[in-house]
Amino acid sequence: MLKRLLLSGAALAALTTFASAQTSPPADSAAPPAATAPASPGMAAPAATAEAKTDPNLFSNIKGADVVGEGDESVGAVADILIDSSGALKSLVISHGGLVGIGKTYRTYDVSELPQVTDGKLMIGQLNTAALEGLPQYEYPEAETGRASTGAAPADGSAAPAPAPAASGAELWPASNLVGASVGAEEDKASVSDIRFEGNKAAAVLIDRGSLGLGNKVEEVAFEKLTISGTPAEPQIALSTSGGAAANPGAESSTVPGGEMAPPAAPAPTAPAPTAPAAP
């Protein structure tokens, strides 16, 4: 009896499997994958665009360039460029030594014309490590009041910082300190964003007239239209109508973005003092 029940169960299971195989179609391994919805025209991947060529004459592209000397020896890197108040090129500041940016030594290398920077390299064929170590060492000037100082009295009631002295014309200005310096009044939100060099001088500056990176407008202004005062550590820059950085150094600027320095207001006429009547 038990044997008969087992045989009946096995037969029933085989019949169920066969019926299931007949009702379910076999999977087609050659079937194409499910079609994907076409991308919306607005979602198409943007075409690759060529990177804009960088201007090798901008300070931002000169700073950090590898200084390659005699026998293609890498002797250091461009740390800065020193110019006078007229924009004339005086020296390169070359950094060397140190470890991961710590303990570097800075030396000045006088040049009458800026060597060309190609592929991140600035070639000075007659320079080598021994010659570089014999050049004068350069110490960056230290700021006394901070570049952001406006001359206003502090909130704690202490005395306001002294205004920056006028430039004497003999200073050498590090380009890295000029970049970022305010142009005109602090509330104008205009500042130097870069310097363009040509041959033996700083030919122009790029002035960013935006605010907090929103809607920035960059304008290129000839260097000769700048008036530089203050100190090499804390330069103060204004636009000048007379052309030439030595014009009226140290004078307060009324420069506004997009305009030039306003002429000083004419003094108001004064009435003549009344004369006392003659004694009888």
Image: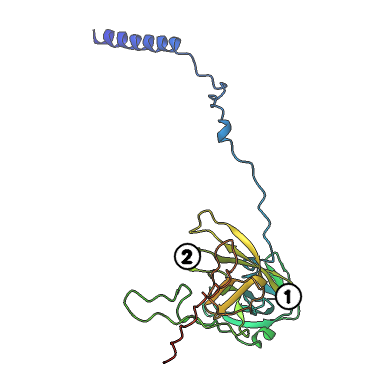
- Counting from the top left corner in percent of width and height, residue 163 is at 47, 80
Q: Which label number is shown at residue 200?
A: 1
- Counting from the top left corner in percent of width and height, residue 98 is at 55, 79
Q: Amino acid at mark 2?
A: Glu
Give the color scheme: rainbow, by chain, secondary structure or one colour: rainbow
Q: Which label number is shown at residue 73?
A: none
Left or right of residue 113, residue 49 in this image = left
Q: Quadrant of the N terminus?
A: top left
Please tell me how crowded label 2 is: few (under 14), some (14-19), or many (20+) other residues with Cα within 10 Å: few
Q: Nearer the viewer, residue 165 or 35?
A: 165
Number of disc labels: 2
| Residue drawn 29% across the image and 11% down it | 6
Against 78, residue 191 (above or below) is above
Q: Amino acid at mark 1?
A: Asn
Describe the element under mark 2 as helix, strand or loop: helix
Q: Quadrant of residue 207?
A: bottom right
Left or right of residue 198, residue 15 in this image = left
- The mark closer to the camera, 1 or 2, is 2
Q: Nearer the viewer, residue 201 or 162?
A: 162
| Residue drawn 54% across the image and 26% down it | 37
| Residue drawn 57% across the image and 23% down it | 32
Q: Which residue is mark 2?
A: 187
Describe the element under mark 1 as helix, strand or loop: loop
Marks 1 and 2, how far apart at CA: 34 Å
Q: Quadrant of residue 238?
A: bottom right
Left or right of residue 119, residue 212 in this image = left
- Counting from the top left corner in percent of width and height, residue 159 is at 37, 81
Q: State which tag comes first along the sequence, 1 or 2.
A: 2
| Farthest front residue in view | 280
